[in-house]
Amino acid sequence: MPRLADAVALANHRRELKNAARHARAPVTVCCGTGCRAKGAMEVFAALSDKVGASPLGERHEIRQSGCRGFCERGPMVIVGNEELHYEGVTPKHATQIVQETLGNGTVLKPLLYRDPVAKQMVERDPDIPFYANQMRLVLRNCGRADPRSLDDYIAEGSYGALAKALTTMYPEEIIETIEKAGLRGRGGAGFPTGAKWQMCRKAPGKPKYIICNADEGDPGAFMDRSVLEGDPHSVIEGMVIGAYAIGASEGYIYVRAEYPLAVENFTRALEQAASYGLLGEDILGSGFSFAMRVQLIGSFRQSLSHWLGDDSFDFNLRVSLGGGAFVCGEETALMASIEGRAGEPRPKPPFPAQEGLWGLPTNINNVETWATVPLIIERGADWYRGIGTESSKGTKIFSLVGKVKNTGLVEVPMGTTLRKIIFEIGGGTLKDRPFKAVQTGGPSGGCIPAEHLDTPVDYEKLQALGSMMGSGGMIVMDERTCMVDVARYFVTFLEGESCGKCLPCREGTQRIREILSRITQGKGELADIEQLEELCPVIRQTSLCGLGQTAPNPVLSTLRYFRDEYMEHIVEKRCRSGTCKALVNFIVLPEKCTGCMACLKVCPADAIQGALKQAHVIDPNHCDRCGSCFDCCRFDAIIVQ
Amino acid sequence: MSAQPSTIDLARISGILRRYRGQPSMLLNALQEIQSVYTCVPPGALYVVARELELPLSRVFNVVTFYAALSLVSRGRHQVRICVGTACHLRGAEKVLAAVSKTLGIRQGDITPDGELGLETVNCLGACALAPVFMLDSKYIAKASPKDIPGLFPDRRAEAALDQKVSQAQVGSSHGEEGSDAPTR
């Protein structure tokens, strides 16, 4: 493909692609995101290609790949034909059936359909599945549709239209005004207005200016950045080029975790293709504007590193540089230190990165989702975007719904959607329909929100009022078998390990909190421990330099606020009702409920359960190692925590 | 670390460093590349790196010890990386870690005596729907159950586990289940 000389050439190319698509074969799309691949999607793709290629059906059907569809729980997924039949849990063995029966005879394969856990019925078409039907997929619009290996796919879907519009019809100031007016706020956590940030960087003296895409998705339990980079890398590139033009930046970096090898692969390929089309690099679309990109990899995947290290084929100043993998590097000043080859320790602000950033020059950092939203706003206008969301938070937000929920996956909804709708309508409710206990939002330094606040509309301010935060959009569902003290201990242990150690309150404070919480979960807690936690937490919050330390006490404070009774139970009664804290748990069998099915006998790794078929079983507390396997597997609620 | 060779041939280091000479900002790249060759950054290499990149030795040591991706001791030729992210934690990551640790006979952060396999934890692999999940080199093992793990590492060797074509997820979760809960917590 030759370079696209200008915006007209791009529009012509798009028209040609759309015309060709009208005569195209019906697509059979295999989701090839990380989740589906891990479950064997590539084997499914190969088997389908094989079967279709060998039959006359190949003239009517095309087997395609797509990026992550966000419904990873159900993979590998195959979307069949223009009617978009949704098949899930597909294995290579199903390929013959799909080709012969569905493609050949038009028969729907019922066993491969999605069964809605709420309505208890089969759903045939992909868009009708409540998980998708209740979403508003704007940023994720191309994810799971276009083939990440083909730039033409994205151009046919409309990609780079916003870039052409920005470069040919808008002044840089006009772009910033549009973003400001749209009310876009940073999707990485703090929710700072994006337009104001750009303005500050544009006005700052100093050249060259840099822009950075923060793809150091360090929050455990959040994977929207991975999915966007895998499934729609071109939206991120397009957003960055528009941002660079508006700010007056000439060079861009993306700082991405190497834990995401497929995202790195898809994104780097997309950069190469965009550059070959003249959508990146020198004189973009004949506008005279030039912009170069670099990928910064962090983490320790040697396989992916050796692949990129050996590749010198990039001719547009794309050099792969590597970082090291640390949660604190998500903080913007720490991230820049890491790009400069130093340890990723945050520094005080001001000066803000917009004034003195990378190499001491004005720098603008935004998160993946923020960059991917920019083309939408430019294309459809600020007023359209303002129409979605709440008073203070505009647009949509992607949440990663994980934990004890039926439909684990990525969910994009307008700001202001209630937690209940997200978890119970889209997410399908809790696993095994066990009672819901809490939802944790905002990553490790967010907070836990209990059932009584499920009807809260989600936006930046509402979550903060509940003692949690938006963060990058992790949403972790917990049921009655999750211990809230253990959860607080888990998050604080994580933050203790990831504290860079620069400030004493964060370095030592998280350690003290972890010690206290560990004591409580081991049954050695005292009432004074709670007082000490309540004294320690505000000190850490007020005296730490960066966001990591300032928010580190959140998991403790929010669980103390809503689940104080569980702390008291651990300390006073020496009991953990969820069956999690080994030292405080004794499992017993209720003889009147036990049917003698022997299921628990089979899963017990310690052989601590005795009994015969159709006779009530007994757990020997001396041999039991309190793993809870029996508690989990019993279908008759005959095993309880004493 | 028993598997650490007592003497390390540093010959390849000068070759790697030629590309980074006099460029202090390329420190992380240089260290990562050295690590990819030696499975660690040999302590003896720090002096050479400092000299070639024109940096104080303390800076090099600071960076090597700061990032989780870099290590002064060998990580093993193959790596088992257990995800201990929040979703995995809730669905039983600790049990998986314990089972792998027991099967391989090594603790987290250690390598097997033959230097073949290293056992590490990772904060999140971004594959939460597969929880609890772990990786063997670049292969994902999804919805891992402690019971299946001894069978995954016959003779405690990585190759055997890498050879099994379709991951455990295929075997572990049959189609149509309502998202199987972890076998343990």
Image (cartoon, coloured by chain):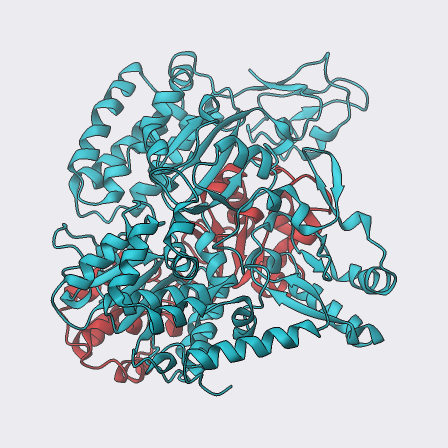
Q: Quadrant of residue B141?
A: bottom right
Residue A416 appears left or right of A112: left
Q: Is residue B32 visible?
A: yes
Tint applied to chain B in the drawing? red
Q: Is residue A182 left or right of residue B165?
A: left
Q: Which chain is cyan?
A: A
- Figure label count: 0
Asked where in the image residue A446 lies, by quadrant, the reply is: top left
Question: Residue A417: x and y, percent?
Answer: 48, 36
Q: Position of residue A513 (x, y in %)?
A: 28, 31
Outermost residue, right direction?
A: A105
Query: Left or right: A307 with respect to A332?
Result: right
Left or right placement of residue B160 versus residue B113 in this view: right
Residue B72 visible from this viewpoint: no
Q: Residue at x 32, y 29 (%)?
A: A465
In the foreground, A52 or A572: A52
Q: Quadrant of the C terminus of chain A?
A: top right
Task: Residue at 18%, 40% (x, y): give it.
Answer: A544
Residue at position x 47%, y 78% in the image: A10
Residue A523 to residue A365: above or below: above
Residue B62 in the image: x percent, y percent? Answer: 20, 60
Say which of A415 and B85 sits in front.
A415
Residue at the extreme bottom: A2
Q: In the rendered image, which quarter is residue A445 located in? A: top left
Image spot of residue A97 (x, y percent):
83, 60
